[in-house]
Image (cartoon, rainbow, N blue to C red):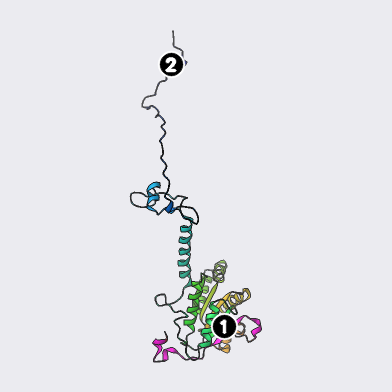
Amino acid sequence: MAENPSTQAPTMSHGTSKPKKLTLSIIKYQALPDEAECPVCGYFDISHPDVQRILGVRRDNGEPNIFYNAQCRCRQAEDQRERDTVLRREQANLPHPLDPRTLETFQPRQGTQEAVTEASSFAQWDGPPVLLLVGVTGCGKSHLLEGIGRYVLGQGKTVRYETASTFLNRLRHTFSSQDDEDIMDLILWYQKQALVILDDLGAEAATDWAAQHLTSFIDQRIQMGMRMAIATNCTQDEMAQRLGDRLASRLFQKNADLGEVNRITLTATDYRMEENYAEHN
């Protein structure tokens, strides 16, 4: 008599192993050390050796194995601030990175006193949004511009320094791509900077296209009340000949009630022509 199939012992096909039994492992928890806990955010510093030992966050090669949510948020915020500071310094494009010029290192002399006072005031966000320094080559304008930029940068604000020719070259290069959106993006990036510094404005004659974009850029910053520091060797007539009447009128405006531009003329001569030039720089 045949056996009832339902009562037969289960058979295994050839080459099939028996299923493994499930086992539960006992996990022992160990409290993280109190000294590794941040008193501000309440999260733990995963760089603490006892925290690393307990959580096992390191591989044999010393690299992080996994990111834990217990990481101190204050440390993360500080790391982000440091990254932001490095990025702001790089994007500021200030000259003389190895031998920085500051407002403190500028040596005033006859013909520069007013410019030093106004530069310091402007750097502290006082006065009209545009500071225009006018004077001959070598009278100290560029030093003051860099000093302003470094002071503002130290206050946590964004800064961008360019010579006017470099600024226009960047616009031309971007425009040559035949993509109007690209040049608009570039101008928008400049306009987002808390302070834009243009050195040697009018040092060379510009095309009508370049003069138009430069004038429009400066007009926009003035209208928005955005800060801008400019240095030029040009008189109003020379500025008009090289960059157009509109920009010259805007920057050399005489109506103080408008409160748009603070124009300061440095009457000092070229530092480089003096025997004690080294003492001033």
Picture layout, residue 183 above or below residue 205: above
Q: Which mark is residue 21?
A: none
Res 169 seen here: no
Q: Nearer the viewer, residue 275 or 14?
A: 275
Q: Quadrant of residue 95?
A: bottom left
Q: Based on the displayed image, in which of its 4 quarters is residue 131 positioned?
A: bottom right
Q: Residue at x 47, y 89 (%)?
A: 109
Q: Which residue is mark 1?
A: 243
Residue on which the image places disc 2: 8
Instruction: Give the residue type that dot 2 points to.
Output: Gln
Q: Residues within 10 Å of mark 2 (few under 14, many from 20)?
A: few
Q: Residue furthest top?
A: 1
Which percent across, then down, holds residue 143? 46, 82
Residue in front for this viewpoint, 243 or 9: 9
- Look at the image and give the residue range highlighted in magenta: 255-279
Q: Secondary structure at mark 1?
A: helix
Residue 276 among magenta residues: yes
Q: In the displayed structure, would residue 227 be above or below residue 110?
A: above
Label 2: state its secondary structure: loop
- Answer left or right for 172 relative to 281: right
Separation (CA) of disc 2 from disc 1: 101 Å
| Mark 1, other Cα within 10 Å: few <14 / some 14–19 / many ≥20 | many
Residue 102 visible in the snapshot: yes
